Structures are given as structure tokens and as C-alpha cells.
Image: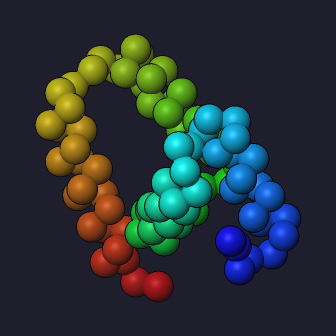
């Protein structure tokens, strides 16, 4: 069934068996979407995104909250600046 390394196939099959995904293709699509996000938005170190989210929550508590639309606009602007920054 699989033309991948045996340990890769076993990992995928185990995830399906545990109920994390309904079928292997679902896990593969999720993995590709994760890779795409990593490439597009930057690869985070383990737990780095959790730490950033926690810092954001603390910042909201300390500095006040703003709307989701404002946050989306600010994020898009920041990503554009990062993409256009000299390398």
C-alpha cells in the first residue's frame, strides 16, 4: 500500500488507528498544509508558537485588546514588511 519508508508508513497508520485522522490521505493533506505554512510564514521551533501566543495574551491583558480585523490587518502588514525586507 505504501511506497514510503516503513517507519513513515507505520507512523501514518498509527495516527489513523488512534483516530487522529480518518484515513491516511487526510493526514498527508494536513502535513502538506503544515509544510506550506512553515514555508510561507516561517518555521517555528518546538513550542515557540505556544510561547508567542501566551505572550500575545499577556500583552492583551496588559495593554488592552483590539478587534480581530485590526489584528488581521496588523499581521498582514507585518508579514509584508518581512517579505520585503532586504535579505
For the point 31% across and 78% down, the residue is 84
Counting from the top left corner in percent of width and height, residue 49 is at 56, 43
Q: Position of residue 43 (x, y in %)?
A: 57, 62
Where does the image place residue 12, in percent across and percent down from the top left?
Answer: 69, 56
Which residue of the protein is positioned furthest toward the front in this rendering?
A: 1
Q: Is residue 58 left or right of residue 5?
A: left
Question: Closer to the camera, 85 or 54?
Answer: 54
In the displayed structure image, the side of residue 69 where residue 57 appears, left or right: right
Q: Is residue 34 above or below residue 59?
A: below
| Closer to us: 58 or 10 | 10
Is residue 38 among what the camera can see?
no
Q: Residue furthest right?
A: 7
Residue 36 in view:
yes
Query: What's the residue at 15%, 37% (across, down)?
Result: 69
Quadrant of res 72 = top left
Residue at x 74% of width, y 77% of height: 4
Amino acid at each position: 500500500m505504501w511506497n514510503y519508508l516503513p517507519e513513515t508508513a507505520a507512523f501514518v497508520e498509527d495516527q489513523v488507528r488512534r483516530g487522529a485522522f480518518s484515513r491516511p490521505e487526510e493526514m498527508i493533506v494536513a502535513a502538506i498544509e503544515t509544510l506550506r505554512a512553515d514555508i510561507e510564514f516561517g518555521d517555528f521551533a518546538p513550542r515557540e508558537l505556544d510561547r508567542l501566543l501566551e505572550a500575545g495574551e499577556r500583552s492583551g491583558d496588559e495593554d488592552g485588546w483590539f478587534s480581530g480585523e485590526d489584528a488581521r490587518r496588523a499581521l498582514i502588514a507585518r508579514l509584508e514588511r518581512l517579505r520585503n525586507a532586504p535579505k
